Amino acid sequence: MKTTKIHLIFCLFIFCLISCNQKKEQKIESTNISQLEIKLDLLDLQAKNKLGKDTIVNIANDPVYHKEKKYKAVSASLLIKNEIDLSKIDPKNTKIVFECLDGYKPEMPLDLFLNANPFLAFEDVDAPKGTKWEPIIKNGNETNADPFYIVYESVSEKDIRYKWPYNLVRIYLEPLNKSKIDLYPLKNKKLEAGYILFKNHCISCHSINGIGGTMGPELNFPKSVTEYWKEKELVNYIVNPASFRHKVKMPTLGVTKQQSQEIVDYLKYMSEHKKVDSN
């Protein structure tokens, strides 16, 4: 009887050990998936005829051309689902990052993007004969949307949660909180408003500590922008860049002077938290 009890206890110990190891393996696998970073090279997919079936989409009020437009396009959500196993990703905790030719890198939650029925436009139906795209005039500068442009048929151009990047070449999927870990003002949460404004209006073009877009200059190292601009002038510049420079590439953000000050206060905080990428 005593031997039977010892054997039973030993079996229970082995069962618990196996169960704990299985849970540990599941936890490791889940962590790896959440940290996964995926890149889609759109030009490469186009060369391999893997973009999908094309269609004509109608945009009632295109935010780039500021008028009704028609494009040849493919379903962006279907393209992503065909190329990526989304069963291994939690869209609610993942963001999509768009990389453009000029270094512009806007981002938005993947779940929001997939549910908006987005399209990847590759040709402008309204373009002048012999061309693929109608010219884009922005702050006196002329360009076009080639090679790709993200558009939506049922999203308001006024909703800033949705991004409309053109000159698009690559798409990345990353953990939703990736940049927040490094850029959030943990030591002074009163600056959270400035951080949110920076994330919504600035990070697509500018980087802090190497995190963000490269269309505009890095703002924190080797010197913070707050270390070589006078604070009052920097606040005014963010509100109205065109009042400082002719044909400036930086657009008017639509922020108030108070909001601009909050952005500058956040940048001053980050100037004390420089973290240069070793790469």
Image: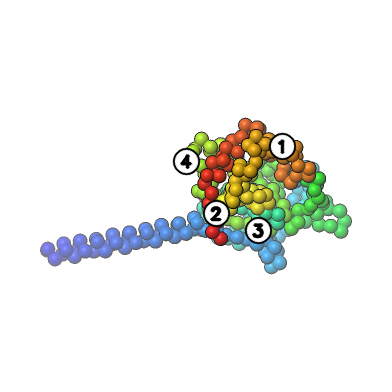
Q: Decide which of tag 1 and tag 4 comes sooner along the chain.
A: 4
Report the Cα–Cα distance between label 3 and label 4. 35 Å
Residue at the far bottom in the pictured view: 48
Question: In which quadrant is the C terminus drawn?
Answer: bottom right
Task: For mark 2, give the secondary structure.
Answer: loop
> Could you say where residue 235 lies in the image, as x and y percent from the top left?
65, 36
- Please tell me which residue lies in front, 215 or 245: 245
| Residue at the spot of label 4 | 187
Kind of residue at badge 3: Arg
Pointer 3 with pointer 4, Cβ within 8 A: no
> Could you say where residue 178 lies in the image, as x and y percent from the top left?
53, 51
User: Based on the displayed image, in which of its 4 quarters is residue 31 positioned?
Assistant: bottom left
| Residue at the spot of label 2 | 276
Question: In the drawing, what numbered circle is on residue 240?
Answer: 1
Q: Decide which of tag 1 and tag 3 comes sooner along the chain.
A: 3
Report the Cα–Cα distance between label 2 and label 3. 25 Å
Question: Given this view, does label 3 or label 4 mark the residue nearer the observer?
Answer: 4
Question: In which quadrant is the N terminus drawn?
Answer: bottom left
Q: Decide which of tag 3 and tag 4 comes sooner along the chain.
A: 3
